Amino acid sequence: FDLFYQQTQGFTSCTEGSDLAGRVWKEKKVLVWDNLSENQHFLRAEAAQMVGLSTGIGLPIMYGDEFLGCIVCFSTTSPAVLAEKITLLTHISEKLGPLVKQKVTEEEYRNVFNISSDPLCIVGFDGYIKKCNTAFDLLMGYQKPYLYTTAIFELIYPDDQARAAEALSLLISGQLTERFSGRFLTAQGEVKWLQWSATVAAESKTIVAVGKDITKRSE
């Protein structure tokens, strides 16, 4: 397939509805094209003929109704012979959607994490902090290794722990829509009032929380 790559390496993008990838994008379903060299919708038909490619398989990567991208595979074999492999590839592409969405979300929040002056953290459904930014470190006075091996409830003022656990449970189940305010204990033993806004990322079983230090306002 080196010749096919050489002939089509300038083909790096497509519009919705054009070529195999674009049609998968538009229709949001698995598409199998045979006789690629004769398919007028396939923009690389001439190159496919040079190397004997006959079948193209386009598999969407979806998260719910959101189209995230697609996988395109080619073969010199007919679709009938490839039936089992197409079924396997379809199952794989269906599993990729949540994983790709998680990575995209992490990348978006990584940029925010790096510049935000507010405490930010990602908390797993198990109650442990998976990631936090420098602002959270400085506010709490703990090093990241400690924070990542300690349940977040252990950082909360004892009288507020039960309420925080209930709020976490309601948030995971989608029943909590309002902000949560509670007292946290720093490494120096100081009490900090933090108000949190949170978003649940069900696919990764995590909660992205943005905090605001309201200690002065609550004293």
Image (cartoon, rainbow, N blue to C red):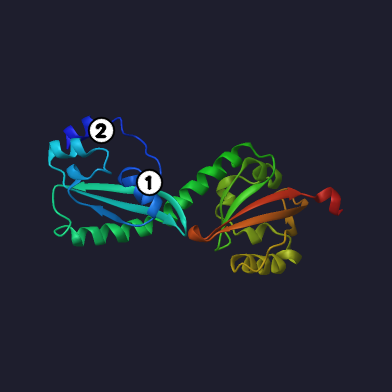
* Nearer mark to the viewer, of 2 and 1: 1
Q: Position of residue 108 (x, y in %)?
A: 54, 43
Q: Position of residue 25 (x, y in %)?
A: 39, 49
Q: Residues within 10 Å of mark 2 (few under 14, many from 20)?
A: some
Q: How many labels, in total? A: 2
38 over 202 or under it: above or below: above
Residue bearing the label numbered 1: 17
143 horizontally vs 18: left or right: right
**Residue 88 figure quarter:** bottom left
Q: Position of residue 107 (x, y in %)?
A: 51, 43
Q: Residue at (26%, 42%) from the top-left corner?
A: 42
Please, what is the three-letter code of the amino acid marked with disc 1? Gly
Foreground of the two, 200 or 60: 60
Q: Residue at (55%, 47%) from the top-left corner?
A: 145
Please, what is the three-letter code of the amino acid marked with disc 2? Thr
Q: Residue at (66%, 39%) from the top-left corner?
A: 116
Q: Residues within 10 Å of mark 1 (few under 14, many from 20)?
A: some
Does the CB distance between marks 2 and 1 fall below 8 Å? Answer: no
157 horizontally vs 123: left or right: right
Real-space Cα separation, disc 2 to disc 1, in angstroms: 19 Å
Residue bearing the label numbered 2: 8
Foreground of the two, 81 or 171: 81
145 horizontally vs 216: left or right: left
Q: Residue at (35%, 43%) from the top-left corner?
A: 18
Foreground of the two, 134 or 10: 10
- Which numbered disc flags the more N-terminal residue, 2 or 1? 2
Furthest residue toward front: 40
